[in-house]
Image (cartoon, helix red, strand yellow):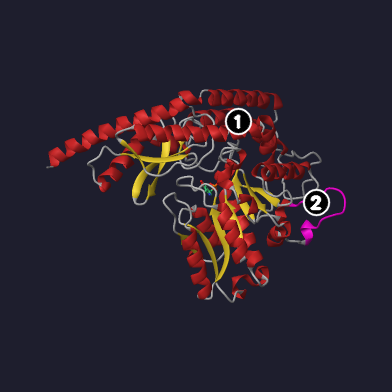
Amino acid sequence: MEPENPNPIEETLDPQDWQSLRRLGHRMVDDMFDYLQDVRRRPVWQPIPPGVKSGLKKPLPQEPRPAEEIYQDFLESVLPYPLGNIHPRFWGWVIGTGSATGMLAEMLAAAMNPNTFGGEQIAAYVENQVVDWCKEMLGYPAGASGVLVSGASVANLVCLAVARNSEASFDIRRLGLQGASQRFTLYASAETHSCIKKAVELMGLGDEALRLVGVNADYQIDLNDLQERLAADRQAGLQPVCVVGNAGTVNTGAFDDLQALSELCQRENLWFHVDGAFGSLAALSSDLRHLVKGMERADSLALDLHKWMYMPYEIACALVRDPGAHRNTFAENPHYLARAERGLASGNVWFSELSPQLSRGFRALKAWFLFQEHGIQKYARLVEQNVAQASYLAALVDASPVLERLAPAPLNIVCFRYNPGGVDEAMLTRLNQELLIRLYESGIAAPSATTLSGRYAIRVANSNHRSRREDFDLLVEAVVRIGKELEGEYAAQSVKEG
Ligand SMILES: Cc1ncc(COP(=O)(O)O)c(C=O)c1O
């Protein structure tokens, strides 16, 4: 047998040459500042060439490659083809824009790379501070418990899981839904985001349990319909457990009457949850705060920080009024996670006890940084600016003879379509669908689309701190120009066909 080598080569992922990695790192930082600074000069979006897509397909790398070369690939094949949401004229879905300092804070968090599951570590204190600021800025009770998660979909799931477990009159953690003698039901308006349906399904309740209640002309939950559905379900022997109120619906930015919902929930002994993914941020503005009245009474509240707080993806917060209920849904106590009285394994809050996640990153750091860098007054002004810009766009649409607004715009969302008159519904849908595709291909602007009362709508959701009024002028000009082009093309086509 060969004698064991007393000095084996032991490997590490740290660079062999720190100096050259440092140079590369500085270059990356400079390049990314240029990238952010020049964003307005680039198209919002551009198609990914087939060669770029196929070029990404490579066998599993077996041997090392210099980081400089990979970075070059990134510059050529990755960086030029993003979704586009950091651009001043991106208004699709409800998507935030990130920020330069956010990028740097992400780097700091990645360098520290803590696992924030628990223990006595500074990241837990930073996260607690961020959760406290979230509560304070929304006027939510200071004693509530909270946890940062990836997005509002998960924040809603966390809150609804607590709702389900708290409302069960049996040990649901032990028995699951098999222990239920009555079927649970939840209530939300038909305008509620699909993540609520997903959460209800994931909780094993089946989406029939989610009663989608009608809305009024302003897309707010119809309280009479809600009351009737509750009564009918109770009559049928079901167990209503929760009402979900919307602070800003995804389609139109509508606010349910949260005050009325909170009173109803109190009367009916139901859990009151609010999906405030972006609309909860209306609480920052003295002009808009009336919209969220009653939100502070919710048993739980989900909000995103990567949407209307413009923080880099991913970050959201789940808040639960009763800390005990929150912990009771997720806390586990295996030997390998035993806590100590002092030292590394001590610590007051173990975030692993507040969501399904054990291992977690340090997403709190960017929020801690950004809250302080900008101050809440600036966020309030930006929210108001986005709302004012949406009103400006709504006025441009209303003033145009060829554009038609399709919903009220109480917040930062405007839904409209190109409609020159005399065109049937099916054709209007076809025309506006094609219009949106051409708008994307032009690289000028990126709204998204939805359907409201059967009518296809171009939908502008403004949670963009880089947008200026002139950007909405450009959007309207482009929509009208492309709409006219298409009208001409369709007319020529029908002459040819007919
Ligand atoms: C009202 C509402 N709720 C929930 C969500 C889901 O949030 P996320 O995409 O952060 O999971 C969204 C996303 O747009 C939303 O608008």
Looking at the image, is 345 positioned above or below residue 384?
Answer: below
Please report the residue visible at 52 percent of the width from the left and 61 percent of the height from the top: 187
Question: Which residue is labeled 2 in the image?
Answer: 348
What residue type is disc 1 on?
Ala
Instruction: Residue 4 in the image: state x and y as whole percent.
Output: 79, 45
Looking at the image, is 121 positioned above or below residue 160?
Answer: above
- Name the main secondary structure of what is drawn in magenta: loop
Instruction: Residue 336 in the image: state x and y as whole percent.
Output: 77, 58
Find residue 104 and report its image quarter. top right
Quadrant into which the C terminus falls: top left
| Circle 2 SS class | loop
Q: Is residue 103 left or right of residue 254?
A: right
- Mark 2 vs 1: CB contact within 8 A: no
Instruction: Residue 94 in the image: state x and y as whole percent.
Output: 50, 42
Question: Which residue is labeled 1 in the image?
Answer: 67
* Highlighted range, magenta: 335-350
Mark 2 or mark 1, which has the lower sequence index? 1
Q: Nearer the viewer, mark 2 or mark 1?
A: 2
Please report the residue visible at 51 percent of the width from the left and 70 percent of the height from the top: 231
- Residue 336 is covered by the magenta coloring: yes
